[in-house]
Amino acid sequence: MNNNQPRPDRILEIANGYWATGILGAAARHSLFTHLEAGADTVDQLATKASISERGAQTLLDGLVALGLVELRDAKYRNTAEAATFLVEGQRTSLSSFAKLKLGEMGKLANQIDVFRAGGPIADAMVEVADNPHWEEVVPAIAAQSVPVATIAADLLCLADAGEISILDLGGGSGIYSAIWLELNPAARSTQLDWGPVNAIARRLLKEHDVADRFTCIDGDFHTIDLGTAAYDIAVYSHVAHQEGPEDNVAIFAKVRQALKPGGTLVVCDYVVDDDRGGPSFPLIFASEMLLKSKKGGTWRRADYQGWLAQAGFHDVSFHPTPSPATLVFAR
């Protein structure tokens, strides 16, 4: 066979990609990674711990081995370093809840045919409302994604040694940035502006981190609420830009510029696309999620951010890669 001849393998793998989502989500739902980390390492032990059939346990383990999340040595199973770090329950970096969330969302993919035709979400797919019960599940589930990035941002900004600083987190969701940054800097204070039901979730997290006494919430819509003038040293805009259209991002950046003290820094975290739209792969594919769930959102290019931030009055813009699919953007 000619080695240069096209093969169907990759197309078959992509077309059956829901297998991976199903295996990962089911394994997370049955706490398989947590049981493995606790020492259960055979099919029968894991079946018992997870309260599933041995046939089901074997099939899940086979799939996890194929996905590179579980290793098999001498008839014993164990988590890979990646799974041990990001899929064991109870850890700050655990994406187990996120894997379960995605398993539950698989049915929504059937709507994508209509979504691509319409150029936006259909009515029952909308999540851009304050009182959607969806937030109670999704906000805690996605928090772990921001842990490594928030830590990197803190290091780059030297937050631990910054003293009495004031932080504004726009659309802060779970409050994970505030939780991590207030832990690192006992003199800092943080304000989160988000919808009331979302802020309630954040207050619980900040209480768990024992920093709730330095955390304030403003309930409302950051599109319309006045942010003040020269009130904050740092502003955070994490995973919000992809939900907004270009005009809204410019308007919000301008409000943040006014709200920052002289020399203050805006920290944007999002999935950033190369200017020629040739990559990276995760941000390019993620755009379909925004088409499904937002009215104007998408994944934006570096040039978009540079242009928007310049229009808003920022002059010093820098991009910082992270170990996650997200990029940090600092603007001053």
Image (tube, rainbow, N blue to C red):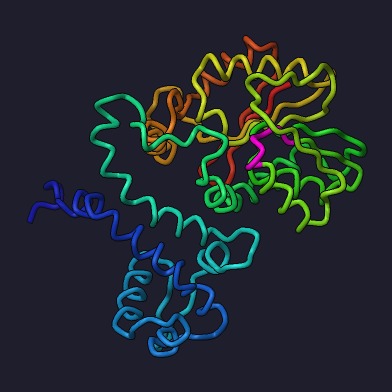
The structure residue drawn at horizontal position 34% and vertical position 73%, both measured from the top left corner, is 60
Q: x and y percent of residue 217 in the render?
A: 76, 37
The structure residue drawn at horizontal position 51% and vertical position 62%, both measured from the top left corner, is 96
Answer yes or no: is residue 137 visible: yes
328 versus 73 height, above or below:
above
Answer yes or no: is residue 328 visible: no
View extreme (front): residue: 131
The structure residue drawn at horizontal position 59% and vertical position 43%, both measured from the top left corner, is 322
272 and 248: which is toward the camera? 248
Q: x and y percent of residue 317 in the render?
A: 66, 22
Q: Is residue 296 magenta?
A: no
Q: x and y percent of residue 304 in the render?
A: 52, 18
Region rendered in magenta: 192-198
Quarter occupied by residue 196: top right
View extreme (left): residue: 1
11 versus 51 height, above or below:
above
The structure residue drawn at horizontal position 74% and vertical position 21%, both measured from the top left corner, is 332
Q: x and y percent of residue 272 in the render?
A: 50, 31
309 and 274: which is toward the camera? 309
